[in-house]
Image: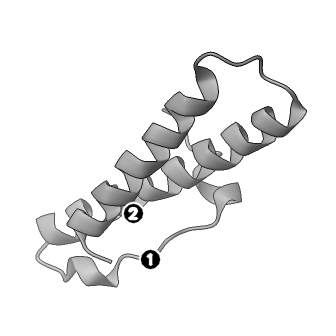
Amino acid sequence: MDERDIRKTIAELVEREHRLRTGHELDDDRRRELAAIEAQLDQCWDLLRQRDALRDVGRDPGDARSRPVSQVESYLQ
């Protein structure tokens, strides 16, 4: 997956997130779906950061791998 694919996924997830948040009361199902979307977004952003870091040190950005939600959710912002 290259940056273009990752950014497309991010855009799609953000669109879904906005649809869920607008005009509707957040029931338990919507909250769970939002939490899943937020976790996927964190993974995508982490993957982009990894790719940038690898490129910055002269390595192949294709070596970046998606990390588990449990790992990316614990990062400090």
Q: In this view, does 33 lie above or below 57?
A: above
Q: What residue is shown at x 11% (from left), y 76% (from top)?
A: 58
**Residue 45 in sight here:** no
Residue under label 1, please give it: 65
The residue carrying pointer 2 sits among few (fewer than 14), some (14 to 19) or many (20 or more) residues within 10 Å by Cα, namely many
Q: In this view, does 31 lie above or below 67?
A: above
The answer to whether mark 2 and mark 1 are in CB contact below 8 A is yes
**Residue carrying label 2:** 47
Say which mark, if any, is on residue 16. none
Query: Residue 29: x and y, percent?
Result: 84, 39
Could you tell me which quadrant the N terminus lies in?
bottom left
Q: In which quarter of the image is residue 2?
A: bottom left
- Disc count in the image? 2
Along the line of sight, the residue nearer the viewer: 24 or 57: 24
- Residue at (64, 66) in percent of width and height: 68
Q: Is residue 68 visible?
A: yes
Question: Looking at this rendering, what residue extends furthest in the front direction?
Answer: 23
For badge 2, the amino acid type reads Leu
Alpha-carbon span between mark 2 and mark 1:
7 Å
Q: x%, y% of residue 59?
A: 18, 80
Label 1, secondary structure: give it. loop
Check disc 1 and give the amino acid type: Arg
What residue do we see at 21% from left, 64% from top? 4
The mark that comes first in sequence, 2 or 1, is: 2
Q: In this view, does 44 lie to the left or right of 68?
A: left
Farthest right residue? 28
